[in-house]
Image (cartoon, rainbow, N blue to C red):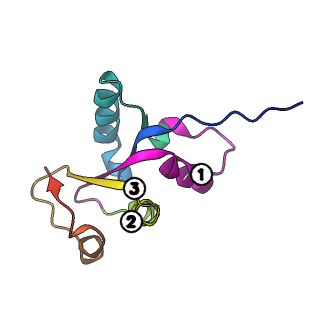
Amino acid sequence: MATHVAQAPYDVFISYAREDAAKAEAIRSALGELGVSCFLDTAGIVAGESWAKKIASAIDASAVFLLLVSEHESEYCLNELRIARKSGKRVVVVNLTSRTPMTNELELEIGHLQHTA
């Protein structure tokens, strides 16, 4: 008889543009050292698994949605942010570079939130 094993929830889902992968990994590592469990797509998806399904599931299983903002735009990040907001997740925005202006679309999505650099 097969048994279903529920996935452990994550403390933080990290959303980032691909160009910022090294910074995202450094943040994941630092949080991990503090005992914070993080989902980062480079380590959380196995070969053959549905990427979109896993991303949506990981967002749902996370307490906090961490959006890393930089000069690199990512439609995937905007889509992930929309899923997180629709799910009522706490959203934390970290601007990786203090000089990064937000696009109009990103401003509409997160302009009302407090940001940190």
| Horizontal arrangement in the rendering, residue 100 relative to residue 59 (left or right) | left
Of pointers 1 and 2, the one earlier in the residue sequence? 1
Indicate which disc, 1 or 3, sits on the residue closer to the N terminus.
1
Give the amino acid type for the residue marked by disc 2 in the picture. Leu
Give the image location of residue 42, x and y in percent: 48, 39
Q: State the separation of the CA atoms marked 1 and 3.
A: 20 Å
Three-letter amino acid code of the residue under disc 1:
Trp
- Residue farthest right in this picture: 1
Q: Earlier in the sequence, mark 3 or mark 2?
A: 2
Magenta extent:
43-72
| Residues at circles 3 and 2 in contact by the CB criterion of under 8 Å | no
- Of discs 3 and 2, which sits in the foreground? 3
Q: CA distance from mark 3 to mark 2?
A: 14 Å
| 35 relative to 107 in the view: left or right | right
63 horizontally vs 96: left or right: right
Query: Are the residues tagged 1 and 2 within 8 Å (C-beta)?
Result: no
Q: In the rendered view of the protein, which quadrant contains the N terminus? A: top right
Where in the figure is residue 93, as x and y percent of width and height? 24, 54
* Residue 78, numbered label: 2
Picture residue at 57% right of the left edge, 40% below the top: 45
**Badge 2 element:** helix
The verdict on residue 7 being magenta is no
What residue does disc 1 label? 51
Type of amino acid under label 3:
Lys
Tell me the SS state at disc 3. loop
Which residue is disc 3 drawn over? Answer: 89
| Quadrant assignment, res 81 | bottom left
Residue 50 on image: x %, y %: 65, 51
Give above or below for 32 relative to 58: above
Q: Nearer the viewer, mark 1 or mark 3?
A: 3
The structure residue drawn at horizontal position 31% and vertical position 22%, both measured from the top left corner, is 33
Label 1 secondary element: helix
